[in-house]
Image (cartoon, rainbow, N blue to C red):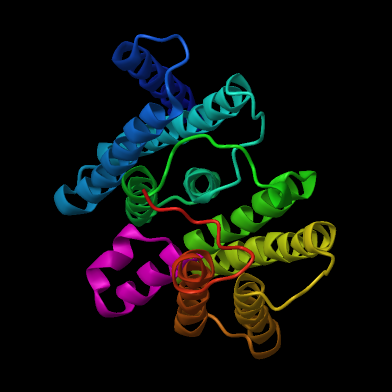
Amino acid sequence: MKKAYPIGLGLLIAFLIYLLGVAIQKEILPENSYIFSIVTFVYLLAGIFYLIYILFKWDRAIFIGSVIGWGGFLGNLLGIIIRWIQTHQTGFGYVPLSNLYESLVFFTVCIVGIYLFWEFKIEKKFMGSLVFILSFLFLAFANLKTDPSIKPLIPALKSNWLIAHVVTCFLGYGAFTVAFVMGVFNLLSETHFSLQKFLPEKEILDSFIYKSILFGFFWLTIGIITGAIWADQAWGSYWSWDPKETWSLITWLIYATAIHLRLTRGWSGKKLSWLSILGFLSVLFTYFGVNFLLSGLHSYAELS
């Protein structure tokens, strides 16, 4: 029952986020971007409480941070649902996963949702600090630098395969982000021994890194397959070595190598942590670098 407390209290916070959006806009269905703006700072507040735990040794701060984090997660989900409804109100009617703004808000939902699932299984929860700060940064970038307006889809995006492709890829990206966070703390604990008492035991942390990589690898594989099917329908070819496709394959190979080395060479600890960091850097370039630095069929990013 105690594990349900953060979820129940988080639901109350999500409701308060909705009421704040209603009060700001004086509408029963507030503009989705207002909800996401509020959630951005909720994530930051959650991250701060996790940091308070280590700075001031206040055990209650972890519980408060977790409650606020659940509130942000549920508020984030609520914002996506409201945006989905509002796409129908504008007459376009699509699942909001089609542009950089929408993918970023879904990315943060995946990161936080996967972390909160793991948090139920981890006794020491300090890693939530970096998870929520990263989620804050991604969502802040979405609010400040991308176009939140709802626009009609281009023909290539009018496919049910879009939903399958984006959902599976970002479930993978979310898991890889959590593995990255765990890998960073694992490496930091090697040089800053005072951190070790705030983290799970090495074997447990190592197991969670590997399981997160496995989970992400499964979904990224499905994402690449669904993307190939979608590409064939949209452009008449399963694979065209578009920059996004190429870097998705590079990312897949990095994590495939990590899993292979874990199974055949028993790689763990520092080695697995470094691979989780390398893989996450590849994820970031696949997601941001390709959109802003390289041109191709997948370049749908629009900065405001």
The stretch in magenta equals 179-200
* Residue 289: percent from left, percent from top: 46, 71
Q: Is residue 71 above or below residue 125?
A: above
Q: Is residue 94 above or below residue 199?
A: above
Q: In the visual, does 7 lie left or right of 163?
A: left
* Residue at (52, 43) in percent of width and height: 102
Which residue is nearer to you in this view: 15 or 129? 15
Number of marks present in the image shown: 0
* Residue 230: percent from left, percent from top: 79, 57
* Residue at (65, 52) in percent of width and height: 166
183 in the magenta segment: yes
Which SS type dominates the magenta stretch? helix
* Residue at (31, 58) in percent of width and height: 198
Q: Is residue 175 above or below residue 153?
A: below
Asked whether residue 281 is in view, the answer is yes
User: Which quadrant of the view contains residue 254?
Assistant: bottom right
* Residue at (59, 38) in percent of width and height: 96
Which residue is nearer to you in this view: 198 or 152? 152
* Residue 196: percent from left, percent from top: 32, 67
47 in the magenta segment: no
Q: Is residue 208 above or below residue 41?
A: below
